[in-house]
Amino acid sequence: MKWFVASSRTLNVHHVVYRRDGGSDSVKNLVLIHAECHRQHHASDHRRGRQSEGSA
């Protein structure tokens, strides 16, 4: 049973345009991404700073 739980979490739903930047929850704005890739993608957001911060 634990194998199923672990394997069921290997994909995450990712917003192409972040909701904080006006993106929606519509299917057109969502993609499935491997959980570790998703984590790395968002970790890189913090390394380079959020692009929406400081702009405006």
Image: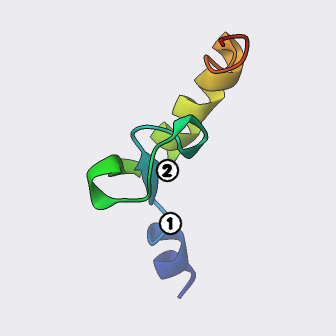
Number of numbered discs? 2
The alpha-carbon separation of the residues under discs 2 and 1 comes to 7 Å
Q: Nearer the viewer, residue 39 or 31?
A: 31
The residue carrying mark 1 is 9
Image quarter in which the C terminus is found:
top right
The residue carrying mark 2 is 35
Q: Which of disc 1 and disc 2 is earlier in sequence?
A: 1
Q: Secondary structure at mark 1?
A: loop
Q: Residue furthest bottom?
A: 1
Which class describes the residues within 10 Å of circle 2: few (<14), some (14-19), or many (20+)? Answer: some
Left or right of 11, for residue 2:
right
Disc 2 to disc 1: CB gap under 8 Å: yes
Q: Residue furthest front?
A: 56
Left or right of 14, for residue 20:
right
Say what amino acid the circle numbered 1 marks.
Answer: Arg
| Residue 36 locus on image (x, y percent) | 51, 43
Left or right of 37, for residue 2:
right
- Picture quarter containing residue 45? top right
Say what amino acid the circle numbered 2 marks.
Answer: Ala
Reply above or below: 47 against 35. Answer: above
| Residue 5 locus on image (x, y percent) | 53, 78
Q: Nearer the viewer, residue 15 or 33?
A: 15
Residue at the location (70% across, 23% down)? 46
| Residue 23 locus on image (x, y percent) | 46, 44
Residue at the location (43% across, 37% down)? 17
Reply above or below: 31 against 53. Answer: below
Q: Secondary structure at mark 2?
A: helix
Q: Nearer the viewer, residue 3 or 40?
A: 40
